[in-house]
Image: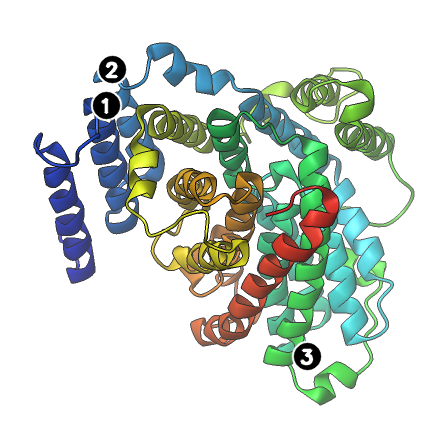
Amino acid sequence: MTLTPRQAVVLCAALSVCGLLLVPTNFDGLGADARVTLVVFALATCAWIATPIDDTYVALGAGLILTVTGVTSTETLFGTLGDPTVWLLICAFVLAAAVARSGLAGRAAAFLISGARTVRQLVHLTTAALVVTAFAIPATSGRAALALPVFLALARALADRRRLVVALALLFPTVILLSAVATLIGAGAHLITVSVLWETTGERIGFHEWLLLGLPLAVVSSHLAAEVVLLVTTRRADRRGPVRVTVEDIQAHSEQRVTGPLTQGETRCGLLLATVVALWCSEPIHGVSPALVALIGAVVATAPALGTVRLKDALATVPWSLLIFMAMTMAMGVALAESGAADWLVGGLPIGEAVPAWVFLLVVVGISTAAHLILQSRSARSSVLVPLVVASALAAGVDPVAAALASTAAAGFCHTLPASAKPVALFSDVPAPTPTYTPADLLRLSMVLGPLTAGLVLAFALAVWPLLGVAP
């Protein structure tokens, strides 16, 4: 494999740092376990950034090294796979498979979009529909795959309005990425953040807490992004023109059935999904774990008499590679916290209790927003940034929950390049002759949306979340 100049520089820098960490006479107060952890952490980060090696393979190797060297125990390594958040995601994917198989999601989206009479209404109704999918479909790539047929049907119905189709092509991945923060299952990175906070501070963020903090941000940022997409990609004449997309228009260009009365399967699936989401949101009342609720829902969704999908088929949709990646990065986070490596790294930074919270959060949000240019995997970004952010927040006297949530929310912006996120790549490569966006369109959008998103996250962290009980 031939490395590019950037990859070679990153590798040399990481190896140099690792070499210094192995010198026993340097870095007073840094124990052997912490040295090994930092070496593994640096090499894993380097591999995620500069090599084409699969992210999960790198994480698996890092977790294995930490266990073989005795930094983490075997129980810790394998115990991460049994973490409730991992089971929550597994069961959520099973539920998502049932929803997709029933056709309920496409029918709901078509019904909502058909109510539009103007371009702006179409864009914002589409945005609202995409935000709602965060409760039904876990992970952004799964939501993008489910939404792509809806976009293609819309594009064919609006084939004579090219700029509007390009705007919709940009809108779908943009909203999918920004609205993921609405729920705990919106992205694997969220589960990594929750795990790091639990292992480091002992604070467990449940589904309802995340919903309370994340949903308002998701709604505001998504609809604000919709306006930015309209302004960047369309002209005033495009926005003034009327639009009329009926359910029949979408049905004519869709493989799924979106007209007529609900089938029994769609009705059962809708009731099950509504019940599961309601139980997730009301956890403080009944005290049942969200993972257990999801497991019950998954069993019902795949039951021979009641379900809409077979268990075998539903399990085939679960991204096991992502789950293993999450488990291994959780083990890395435990090693960073327990070995003292994270505290040592933070100790070298020029921070203290005198640093104002808004300055600290400004730096965290800025770094997290730009991190997608270096680390393209959202989960990898959280694996690298969140443990350091939490440790730095504790040292600076800032609420680690606010800092971790701000970092994770800001990392949801990854729109600069087609390769920056899977939904962006998916909608940039739609089948011809459907028009879609170019890298130049993405760059124009990101130049406006990047600073705007970062500012919005900072505003929520400083002004809105304190009203909800999370003050910096």
- State yes or no: discs 1 and 3 in contact (Cβ < 8 Å): no
Give the distance between the C-alpha atoms of the residues marked 1 and 2, in whole angstroms: 8 Å
Sequence-earlier tag: 2 or 3: 2
* Residue wearing tag 1: 33
Residue 294 placed where, x, y %?
69, 23
Give the distance between the C-alpha atoms of the residues marked 2 and 3, in whole angstroms: 62 Å
Give the distance between the C-alpha atoms of the residues marked 1 and 3, in whole angstroms: 61 Å
Does 288 appear above or below 59?
above
The residue that appears at 44% across and 71% down in the rendered structure is: 439
* Residue wearing tag 3: 161
Dot 1: within a 10 Å radius of its alpha carbon, few (fewer than 14), some, or many (20 or more) residues?
A: many
Q: Quadrant of residue 153?
A: bottom right
Residue 457 placed where, x, y %?
59, 57
Q: Residue furthest top?
A: 75
* Residue wearing tag 2: 70
In the image: residue 311, left or right of residue 77: right
The tally of labels here is 3
State the SS at label 1: helix
- State yes or no: discs 1 and 2 in contact (Cβ < 8 Å): yes
The residue nearer to you, when weighing 254 against 190, is 190
Sequence-earlier tag: 1 or 3: 1
Mark closer to the observer (1, 2): 1
Mark closer to the observer (1, 3): 1
The residue nearer to you, when weighing 393 against 273, is 393
Residue 217 placed where, x, y %?
68, 54
State the SS at label 3: loop
Residue 167 placed where, x, y %?
63, 72
Dot 2: within a 10 Å radius of its alpha carbon, few (fewer than 14), some, or many (20 or more) residues?
A: few
Q: Quadrant of residue 269?
A: top right
- State yes or no: discs 2 and 3 in contact (Cβ < 8 Å): no
